[in-house]
């Protein structure tokens, strides 16, 4: 049975769609530790979990954030290769997570929403640090390599 013959409410991908999704993800995503393959749902879950953490108050350093958001780059590179039906089905989920990430972060000065890889050029609004890592109005320990002063809208929470 092809997609056109199924009820329009069906969200379950066909075998062909499932295989195409996995082929797209595999073409872009690295094999993870232990030899586990990355899946589209795992990428979306990781992006959601990182966004949850950023919303609550990101407690790691700037280089770690850069490392943690790897999944969004993989999603961006994979998305055009996905079957249209899968993109249509998953787009609202991705858009929702992206919007939450944008609200929980501020743009890096000099970069806009239309930048390629826009998620890289954002800073969490809430940085959670140990009291000993907080340095007044400056960036806390682990963020001091930022090439601009800490914006007032970035709150450091000890």
Image (cartoon, rainbow, N blue to C red):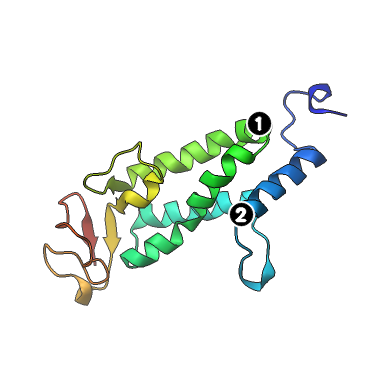
Q: Is residue 17 above or below residue 34?
A: above
The numbered mark at residue 30 is none
Q: Are marks 2 and 1 in contact (CB under 8 Å)?
A: no
Q: Choose top left, top right, bottom left or bottom right for residue 7.
A: top right
Q: Going by the picture, which residue comes out furthest to the right?
A: 1
Query: What is the crowding at mark 2: few (fewer than 14 residues within 10 Å), some, or many (at least 20)?
Result: few
| Left or right: where 53 falls relative to 88 | left
- Which x, y percent locates residue 104? 33, 47
Q: Choose top left, top right, bottom left or bottom right for residue 3.
A: top right
Q: Nearer the viewer, residue 49 or 61?
A: 61
Q: Residue at x 26, y 49 (%)?
A: 108
From the image, state whether disc 2 or disc 1 is nearer to you: 1
Q: Residue at x 81, y 25 (%)?
A: 6
Residue matched to label 2: 42
The numbered mark at residue 84 is 1
Q: Residue at x 72, y 26 (%)?
A: 9
| Left or right: where 82 falls relative to 69 | right
Q: The residue tagged with tag 1: helix, strand or loop?
A: helix
């Amino acid at each position: 049975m092809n997609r056109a013959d199924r009820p329009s409410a069906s969200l379950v991908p066909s075998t062909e769609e499932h295989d195409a999704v996995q082929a797209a993800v595999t073409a872009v995503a690295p094999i993870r530790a232990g030899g586990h393959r990355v899946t589209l749902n795992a990428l979306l879950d990781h992006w959601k979990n990182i966004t949850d953490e950023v919303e609550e108050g990101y407690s790691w350093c700037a280089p770690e954030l850069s490392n943690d958001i790897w999944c969004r780059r993989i999603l961006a590179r994979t998305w055009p290769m996905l079957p249209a039906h899968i993109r249509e089905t998953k787009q609202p989920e991705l858009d929702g997570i992206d919007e939450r990430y944008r609200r929980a972060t501020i743009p890096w000065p000099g970069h806009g929403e239309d930048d390629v890889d826009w998620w890289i050029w954002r800073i969490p609004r809430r940085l959670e640090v140990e009291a000993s890592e907080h340095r007044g109005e400056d960036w806390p320990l682990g963020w001091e390599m930022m090439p601009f002063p800490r914006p007032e809208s970035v709150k450091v929470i000890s």
